[in-house]
């Protein structure tokens, strides 16, 4: 997420919230007008450095017209960051930080009350409970559905996110403490993995009309396939996202209308969300704000899987049995792949696959191209991009993992002292067999090339592709891990288009 220092105004505003009590109660008796239309479930965490912003977004629910709450419930389960993080980020005064740090509260929004009155709800559950435990989310869902039943449900999961990468999706008997979704800083930055998040939802046994992953980089094929049978729609950003605003008031406002076309409503929300970021950040044509939001129709995911299985089958067969010219064409497409996040091995899936199809007309004819385009288009209900991305025509679609010979690379960047431009200084390579080694990257005389030197001792990242990636619904449907292992060309290591750098395979074997 983008970094932005809290202002005194924000901190002062939330210092006025009433202190929590020390008792442990189930906050299920808040008077709310019953409804049989929608219940919106918000499940979030301060995330260490986002407390003021997140509370401000929740507060925006109160800006919806009061009458929409005759048809819509909004219930909130929110865990505050640790006392230490609240102090470091200068959020609240000392007394409030001690009362709120690592505490979880629940409430249902009552539009007749002030936000500060509602957030004085008693503590729910054990102090500093692990919100990334699947049972925690499942219990919240069960409580909300029982107390506020409705015809349809929407789940908002709000915190830091990092898309899908195998080393953050370790099996349950390992400790995953790298990038993921919904970090709990009170529990050593534990987070939901793709599998633990799915387990929480299946345990709750509630079908959601919409799941909104309000966290960075969550619009990727790996998560879309994992969730497709648990909901009808997924809202998620492909890029990182700002913490400011987000137009939460629009959600109950749109769903609380007497007659709701859900796809039009989700389209309108995503548009309002991205517009609110542009309005808050006030970018010009040269301000590189990479923000976006996509709505996916999950009923179309299985057919997309069938087409992608065929694409992967042909790709692997051509790379293995085709001509040198065909392999060179595929390698060129991989070396030119568009990266979503500058440090993560996540790439624009649609553009990468389309480039390969167009490069190999003898393998993928026009009919196949049209079938794949239609399959992707049927999944996408709405997409909106920031002003900067739109002006520069640098929009991305779904992200997907890409690497070489079963390995993938996370790049470490640092700003050049003279130019201020980020430059790669190191990398960590995660190999298919569970090995991990570090690289130092050094510029060469060729500005399009960096040399790589292995440093330190060989390590382990805790698992293998077989125990992580191959367990995904996406891989079972498409066999994408076959291509991850077969491909020998490192993908483009940069994010901006036109910079077709490639990370060379290290010449020195790790000792």
Image (cartoon, rainbow, N blue to C red):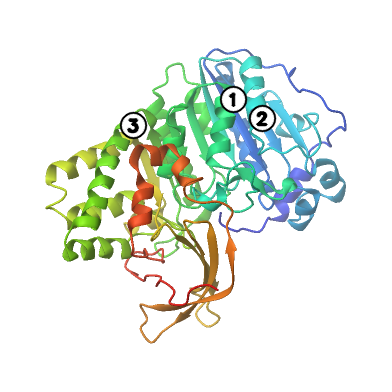
Residue 4 position, x and y percent, is 61, 58
Dot 2: what SS? Answer: helix
Q: Residue at x 56, y 57 (%)?
A: 2
Sooner in the amino-acid sequence: mark 2 or mark 1 = 2
**Nearer-N-terminus badge (1/3):** 1
Q: Is residue 197 left or right of residue 87?
A: left
Quarter placement of the N terminus: bottom right
Q: Which residue is located at x 51 percent, y 45 percent?
A: 467
Residue bearing mark 2: 135
Circle 3: is it few (<14), some (14-19), or many (20+) Cα within 10 Å?
some
Residue in front for this viewpoint, 159 or 120: 159
The vertical placement of 283 against 272, above or below, is below
Q: Where does the image place residue 109, in percent across and percent down from the top left?
A: 66, 26
- For residue 223, say whether it is visible: yes
Specify the label residue 302 is tagged with: 3
The x and y percentages for residue 123 are 80, 31
Q: Considering only order in the chain, which callout, 3 or 2, is on the residue closer to the N terminus?
A: 2
Instruction: Quote the CA–CA distance across marks 2 and 3.
Output: 28 Å
What separation in Å lies between label 2 and label 1 (alpha carbons)? 8 Å
Front position in the image: 275 or 125: 125
Q: CB of mark 2 within 8 Å of CB of mark 1? A: yes
Q: Which residue is mark 1?
A: 203
Observer-nearest residue: 157 or 171?
A: 171
For residue 5, what is the image quadrant?
A: bottom right
Near mark 1 (Cα within 10 A), the count class, few <14, some 14-19 or many ≥20, is some
Give the crowd class for mark 2: few <14, some 14-19, many >=20 residues within 10 Å.
Answer: some
Cβ atoms under marks 2 and 3 closer than 8 Å = no
């Amino acid at each position: 997420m983008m970094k932005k220092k809290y202002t005194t105004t924000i901190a002062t505003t939330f210092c006025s919230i009433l202190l929590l009590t020390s008792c442990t109660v189930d906050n299920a008796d808040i008077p709310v007008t019953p409804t049989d239309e929608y219940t919106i479930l918000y499940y979030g965490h301060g995330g260490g450095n986002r407390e003021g912003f997140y509370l401000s977004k929740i507060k925006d629910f109160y800006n919806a017209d009061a009458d929409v709450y005759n048809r819509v419930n909004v219930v909130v389960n929110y865990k505050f960051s640790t006392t230490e993080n609240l102090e470091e980020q200068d959020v609240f005064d000392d007394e409030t930080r001690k009362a709120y740090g690592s505490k979880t509260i629940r409430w249902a929004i009552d539009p007749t009350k002030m936000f500060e009155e509602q957030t004085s709800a008693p503590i729910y559950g054990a102090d500093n409970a692990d919100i990334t435990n699947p049972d925690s989310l499942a219990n919240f869902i069960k409580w909300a559905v029982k107390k506020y039943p409705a015809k349809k449900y929407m789940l908002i999961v709000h915190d830091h996110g990092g898309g899908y990468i195998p080393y953050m999706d370790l099996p349950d008997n390992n400790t995953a403490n790298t990038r993921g979704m919904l970090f709990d800083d009170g529990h050593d930055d534990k987070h939901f993995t793709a599998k633990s998040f799915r387990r929480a939802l299946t345990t709750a046994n509630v079908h959601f009309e919409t799941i909104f992953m309000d966290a960075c980089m969550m619009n990727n094929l790996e998560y879309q396939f994992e969730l497709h049978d648990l909901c009808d729609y997924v809202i998620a950003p492909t890029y990182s996202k700002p913490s400011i605003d987000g137009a939460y008031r629009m959600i109950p406002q749109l769903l609380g209308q007497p007659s709701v076309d859900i796809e039009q409503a989700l389209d309108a929300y995503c548009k309002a969300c991205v517009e609110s970021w542009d309005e808050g950040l006030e970018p010009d044509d040269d301000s590189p704000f990479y923000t976006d939001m996509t709505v996916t129709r999950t009923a179309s995911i299985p057919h997309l899987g069938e087409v992608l299985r065929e694409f992967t089958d042909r790709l692997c067969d051509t790379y293995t049995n085709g001509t040198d010219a065909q392999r060179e064409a595929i390698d060129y497409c991989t070396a030119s792949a568009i990266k979503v996040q500058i440090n993560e091995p996540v790439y624009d899936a649609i553009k990468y696959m389309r480039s390969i199809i167009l490069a190999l007309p003898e393998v993928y004819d026009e009919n196949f191209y049209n079938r794949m385009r239609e399959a992707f288009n049927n999944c996408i209900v709405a997409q909106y991009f920031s002003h900067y991305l739109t002006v520069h025509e640098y929009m991305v679609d779904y992200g997907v993992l890409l690497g070489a010979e079963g390995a993938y690379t996370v790049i470490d960047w640092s700003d050049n002292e003279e130019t201020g431009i980020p430059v790669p200084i190191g990398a960590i390579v995660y190999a298919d067999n569970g090995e991990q080694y570090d690289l130092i990257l050094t510029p060469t005389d060729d500005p399009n090339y960096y040399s790589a030197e292995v440093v330190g001792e060989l390590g382990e990242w805790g698992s293998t592709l077989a125990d992580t990636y191959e367990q995904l619904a996406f891989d079972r449907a498409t066999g994408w891990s076959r291509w991850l292992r077969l491909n020998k060309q490192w993908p483009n290591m940069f994010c901006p288009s036109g910079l077709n750098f490639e990370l060379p395979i290290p010449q020195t074997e790790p000792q």
